[in-house]
Image (spheres, grey):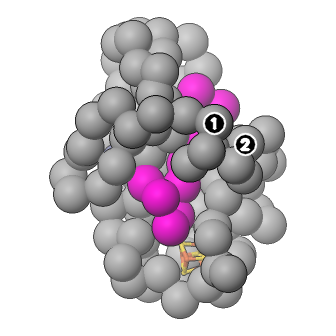
Amino acid sequence: AIDPQFTENREQADTHKGHDVWGPVEEPEKLGIHGTHVAVDFDICIADGACVEDCPVDVFEWVDTPDHPESELKADPANESQCIDCMLCVDVCPVDAIDVDAG
Ligand code: SF4
Ligand code: F3S
Ligand code: ZN
């Protein structure tokens, strides 16, 4: 599962479409965690898609991640500022790849 303390345990490695990326990043195998308020561990995501389908405010957008060992698509929290903290995505992800900091 995603480490809920990732902002303390990881370093910000990059930005992507306006959100932070928390490393380590070694493409294509290691992609890190995308987002901060809505955070998706790309190295855990298996492209199930429940978060993309269920988010009521369309926070997530698919991005291509060719040659990643888990999946070649990831749910990117492209619109994390729109999040209304409903926690649905956290509940539906089968591999616990998402953390939402509703505090
Ligand atoms: Fe969308 Fe709710 Fe997840 Fe926020 S907590 S990203 S609003 S599903
Ligand atoms: Fe990935 Fe979980 Fe969403 S596997 S696509 S973060 S439901
Ligand atoms: Zn991203």
Q: Residue 81 appears in which quarter of the rendering?
A: bottom left
**Are the residues flagged by discs 2 and 1 in contact, CB closer than 8 Å?**
yes
- Residue 37: % across, % down: 50, 67
Which three-letter amino acid code belongs to the residue tagged 1? Asn
Dot 1: few (<14), some (14–19), or many (≥20) neighbours within 10 Å? Answer: few
Towards the viewer: 15 or 88? 15
Name the residue at 46% across, 34% down: 11
Above or below residue 30? Residue 37 is below
Above or below residue 54? Residue 69 is above
Mark identifier at residue 26: none
Which three-letter amino acid code belongs to the residue tagged 2? Asp
Q: Which residues are magenta?
A: 35-49
Frontmost of labels 2 and 1 is: 1
Towards the viewer: 59 or 81? 81
Instruction: Specify whether residue 10 is painted magenta.
Output: no
Q: Quadrant of the C terminus?
A: bottom right
Residue beneath disc 1: 9
Residue beneath disc 2: 3
Q: Main secondary structure of the magenta part?
A: loop
